[in-house]
Structures are given as structure tokens and as C-alpha cells.
Amino acid sequence: DVVMTQSPLSLPVTLGQPASISCRSSQSLVHSDGNTYLTWFQQRPGQSPRRLIYRVSDRDSGVPDRFSGSGSGTDFTLKISSVEAEDVGVYYCMQGPGGKKFGQGTKVEIK
Amino acid sequence: EMQLVQSGGGLVQPGGSLTLSCAASGFHFSGEWMSWVRQAPGKGLEWVANIKEDGSEKHYVDSVKGRFTISRDNARNSLSLQMNSLRAEDTAVYYCARDDYGGVSFDYRGQGSLVTVSS
């Protein structure tokens, strides 16, 4: 089974500064169809999860362009170019398709 | 715009049963795989199960195999999760989600369904 490992698990950030979250999979996420199905979610306190990024780097409609995804194979990164107060929450990576696995989550908070 | 309205949930004793439902709108339900995802109190997200467009293929996380059954009614744009032999560790908020781009997407306006397994 694929294991998704995020780091760090807690990320204190200063408003206006960049932030970066790593997600590593125990095996390559390159699918037989050539795509890599790595998804990023944001969950603000008290809210349902919201998808930010799919297929490694495709941003969902309405997601601010300060969020970006990158990576390949087993190593992936979510970057926030300039953290805003509304970005506080927990961020999860997830692998697919078929049976899916989430990472443990990274809690982003303001210093 | 996708909308997923959930019903069901509540308090159930260990060993009991419960069914969750999800009414979908705003997209071509019968053309999409669908999933259930759960989140135990204070914990992370866990994918639980998914079902193919026509219901012919289903996948489950190991911890619920043999106890939970995912199903769908495409005529009613409805997704269900039948949960039997419930355990305390099944206590969680359950979210209905659409499978797409190899992952899932949630209705961010939804609050999920809280299932509490306790005596």
C-alpha cells in the first residue's frame, strides 16, 4: 500500500512570507496513463476540506495564484508564495486514483 | 456548481448500523465515480470507499471491508453508505465527494455527517 508522508506537520509562518509543504509517497505516483494523480486540499478551522490543486500542479477554479504545486514521481511540494491570514488551516496531500491515501496533514499557523 | 447534500448520521451503539445518504446536483452524477471520506475528531482525512459510475466496481479501505457497503442510485442522483457492525473507531464526520482528476472534490459548503458510535 502507498504511504503518504507530509512534512513538516506544523508550520508557523509570518504573514507575507512564503511557505512550503512537502509530500512524499512510498512509491511512484505516475499512473499507467502517464498522469500523476497528486492532489492538495486545504481545511480551514471548522470547515469542510477544499481542493486546491489536482494532478500535481493544476489549480482549481477560484484558488488564488499564490498557491502552486510541483513535483514528480514520489516527491511533491505545495507552495504559498505570500501567506495571508485566511490561509491558516490544515493542508493535506492525497494520492489516487482508485483506492486513495491522504497524508497526515500539515497545520499552518501564523507566528 | 456541484452540490452534495448529506443526510443520516447520528448516535449509534457499538455493533449497530447506520446509513448515510448524499444527494448530488450540479454535475453529471451518473458519469462520475463517487467517494466517501471520513475524519475522526481531531484527526486527519481518511478515504473510506468509492464506486464506479454504473456501480459495477467498488473499493474500500481495509478497516471497513465486510462492514460498510457503498451504493448509488443514478436515477435519483443519490449515493449511500450502509455501515454495519459499527465500532468506536468509526466515529467521524463522513463526507460525500466526487472522484475526479484521480482525486476527489468536496462541496466546500457541506458540513458532512457526524457519526458517533458509543454506548
Image: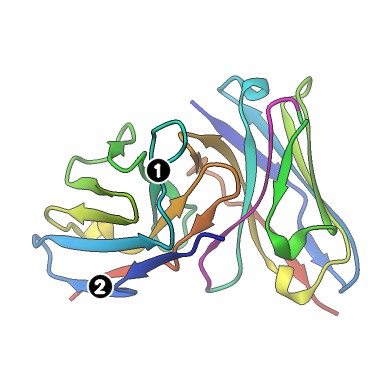
> The C terminus of chain B is located in which quarter?
bottom right
Kind of residue at disc 2: Leu
Find disc 1 in the rendering and name its residue.
A30
Instruction: Say whether residue A10 is left or right of residue B117.
Output: left
Q: Residue at image x 35%, y 63%?
A: A89
Q: Is residue B6 magenta?
A: no
Give the chain of mark 1.
A
Kind of residue at disc 1: Val
Find disc 2 in the rendering and name its residue.
A11
**Closer to the camera, A14 or B38?**
B38
The answer to whether residue A22 is above or below residue B113 is below
Q: Is residue B52 magenta?
A: yes
**Disc 2 on helix, strand or loop?**
strand
Q: Looking at the picture, how far across and down is residue B43, in whole percent?
A: 53, 71
Q: Which residue range is magenta in the image? A: B43-54
Q: Earlier in the sequence, mark 1 or mark 2?
A: 2
**Disc 1 on helix, strand or loop?**
loop
Q: Looking at the picture, how far across and down is residue B100, in whole percent?
A: 50, 33
Outermost residue to the bottom:
B119
Q: Tally the numbered discs.
A: 2
Numbered tag placed on residue A39 in the rendering: none
The answer to whether residue A98 is above or below residue B38 is above
